[in-house]
Image: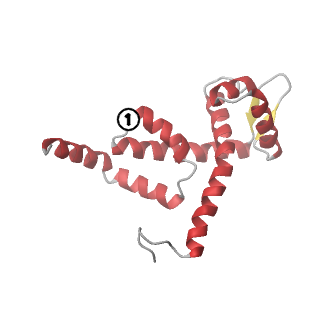
């Protein structure tokens, strides 16, 4: 077992890097699938131009990713229409949204502003493991937000 100041054993150390690489590879796919679901759920079409604008990338970049998502069975494309999620794509979107909600709620409970919590959750949601998500949820269920309010109030009184 290592302490925060020592390196973990090689197997434990490499597992962290492997998990990070896997999350990085999945993050982009998850972002696209989640955004497509968000657009569709708001009654909008998920068109290539819309995805490019919201993701801040060029349309050819979106076209390449949509081909990948279709090859992976996550989306279906219809000529002269937008992109639609398959059942597998919808399930992925729901898993990503659930992780996003927990991470964002945890950050809000810590006292992070709603704008920053939303932005940070967008990145963190891909890298947080199941155990950590469960710990976030337990902390919130135990009243983390009230604890943080009290801690901030106590800190202000002592400064």
Percent of width and height locating residue 22 = 66, 56
Depth check: give the residue in front, 91 or 130: 130
Where does the image place residue 60, in percent across and percent down from the top left?
79, 30
**Residue lying farthest right?**
79
Front-most of 9 and 129?
A: 9
Indicate left or right for 89 with 150 as reference.
right
* Residue depicted at x 23% and y 43%: 152
The residue lying at 52 percent from left, 43 percent from top is 100
Q: Which residue is mark 1?
A: 113
Position of 16 relative to 43 (above/below): below
When asked about the image quadrant of residue 123, the answer is: top right
Q: Say which element carries label 1.
A: loop
Residue 154's spot in the image, x, y percent?
A: 17, 46
The residue shown at (61%, 60%) is: 19
Colour setup of the view: secondary structure
Pick the quarter of the image with the C terminus: top left
Q: In this rendered view, identify the residue nearer to me: 37 or 56.
A: 56
Image-based side of 89 in relation to 121, left or right: right
- The total number of labels drawn is 1
- Residue at 48% x, 41% y: name it: 120
Q: Is residue 70 left or right of residue 42?
A: right
Q: Is residue 99 above or below residue 32?
A: below
Count residues near mark 1 (Cα–Cα under 10 Å), then give few for <14, some for 14-19, many for 20+: few
Q: Position of residue 82 (x, y in %)?
A: 76, 26
């Amino acid at each position: 077992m290592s302490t925060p100041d020592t390196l973990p054993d090689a197997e434990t150390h490499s597992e962290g890097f492997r998990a990070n690489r896997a999350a990085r590879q999945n993050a982009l796919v998850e972002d696209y699938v989640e955004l497509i679901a968000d657009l569709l759920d708001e009654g909008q079409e998920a068109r290539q131009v819309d995805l490019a604008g919201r993701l801040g990338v060029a349309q050819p970049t979106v076209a390449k990713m949509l081909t990948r998502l279709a090859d992976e069975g996550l989306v279906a494309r219809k000529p002269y229409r937008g992109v639609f999620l398959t059942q597998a794509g919808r399930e992925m979107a729901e898993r990503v949204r659930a992780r996003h909600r927990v991470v964002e709620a945890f950050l809000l409970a810590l006292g992070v502003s709603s704008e920053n919590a939303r932005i940070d959750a967008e990145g963190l949601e891909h890298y947080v493991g199941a155990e950590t998500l469960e710990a976030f949820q337990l902390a919130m269920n135990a009243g983390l937000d009230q604890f943080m309010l009290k801690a901030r109030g106590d800190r202000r009184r002592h400064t």
